[in-house]
Image (cartoon, rainbow, N blue to C red):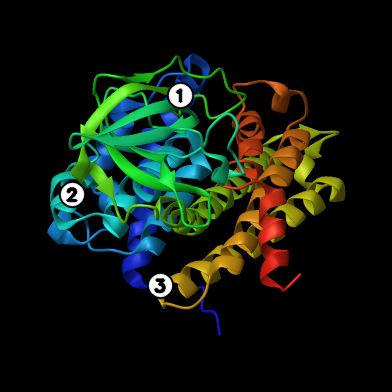
Amino acid sequence: MLDTRLSEEQEHLRKTVEDFARKVAAPVAAHHDSTATFPYDVVRQMGEMGLFGLPFPEEYGGMGGDYFALCLAIEELARIDQSVAITLEAGCSLGAMPVYRFGTEAQKQHWLPLLCSGQALGAFGLTEAGAGSDAGGTRTTARLEDGQWIINGSKAFITNSGTDITKLVTVAAVTGEGPDGKPEISSILVEVPTPGFTADPSYDKVGWHASDTHPLSFNDLRVPEENLLGERGRGYANFLRILDEGRIAISALAVGAAQGCVDESLKYAKEREAFGRPIGRNQAISFKIAEMEARTYVARCAYYDAAARMLTGRPFKKEAAIAKLVSSNAAMDNARDATQIHGGYGFMNECPAARHYRDSKVLEIGEGTSEVQKMLIARLLGL
């Protein structure tokens, strides 16, 4: 039976991050959103709290927690500011986790303490303009020559890839041809800055304005042969495992966004008066908020279950896909309803509900679109 009660330690973490989000992230969220600036000071303080090291062992500079602890932190941050939440999610599950899962001991010792401290960010270079959901269509190449990998190509929509503290990008590249004639895809660690690496101008996005996202270019970029991450030819398979885990973390982020919409709607419904009484006393409003709360609850249970399965060594691919699908739908539906409840004010960018409305759409796209999740679920049902 799924037990959704948090332990005393987990509740302490949740409350600590909730307080941080409201006292530190919330006051500057609108500013960073409107100016599309990266919240360096907020991220620095997150690093000092140990949030970037939550799921990693203490021997590598981590906090000795687990993936669920990371999810709890992401959820609380996303209630206030999705840009800050995705910075943590990508920094941990996409930036540092590949090194922890597949790196050599030397790679772990070198990179993880830096990434766990939050003083440096890592990025996950998989997506390309012509290889999104079809990651197997990777065109970036890496050839081995005189003990060095020479990388050429480009990546698209890469989070945490162009900040002043970005120090590592893990790149998926074609390194040859497999026995079946298909491209052999491997993972290679690229230290930033390195000659031949360019973070092109950041995107002008619909939402997540304070999150750092760039296209990347590689032009005869050279790194040592020992920068290969994991077994040669296993890069694609390893990235898929990282994405399976990452979907649970993105689901936590989506649940936080959905809960944030409930929080803002409840507050507004109690304060805003029309026709001589708070609008929350009208069934049209109260029923809408009740539906929002129900969506959030169901989505939270879904990601809790997926996380529990992962941490106990049970199969979780299908449950992670379900959690990602359900929670991203909940975030977008709740954002739409929250904007409607706020009326004209909800259409103003200064309104937190408006920011959630803009931010939440990408949750149905990133780390596997909703259509990809349905495909995975159907496939795992034997269809």
Q: Residues within 10 Å of mark 3 (few under 14, many from 20)?
A: some
| Residue in the picture at 74% in, 38% down | 336
SS category of the residue bearing label 2:
helix
Residue at image mark 1: 214
Residue at the outermost bottom position: 1
* Foreground residue among 211 and 368: 368
| Residue in the picture at 56% in, 66% down | 317
| Residue in the picture at 39% in, 26% down | 152
Contact between labelled residues 3 and 2, with CB atoms less than 8 Å apart: no
SS category of the residue bearing label 3:
helix
Residue at image mark 2: 107
Q: Amino acid at mark 3?
A: Leu
Label 1 or label 2, whichever lies nearer to me, is: 2
Reading the chain from its start, which is encountered first: label 2 or label 3? Answer: 2
Q: Amino acid at mark 2?
A: Gln
* Distance in Å between CA atoms under marks 2 and 3: 24 Å
Which image quadrant is residue 38 in? Answer: top left
Q: Is residue 193 left or right of residue 159?
A: left
Contact between labelled residues 1 and 3, with CB atoms less than 8 Å apart: no
Quadrant (top left, top right, bottom left, bottom right) of the C terminus: bottom right
Q: Amino acid at mark 1?
A: His
Reading the chain from its start, which is encountered first: label 1 or label 2? Answer: 2
Where residue 178 appears, as percent x and y from the top left, is 46, 53
Which image quadrant is residue 293 in? Answer: bottom right
Asked if residue 301 shows in the view, the reply is no
Label 2 or label 3, whichever lies nearer to me, is: 2
Reading the chain from its start, which is encountered first: label 3 or label 1? Answer: 1
Where residue 158 appears, as percent x and y from the top left, is 46, 32
Residue at image mark 3: 311
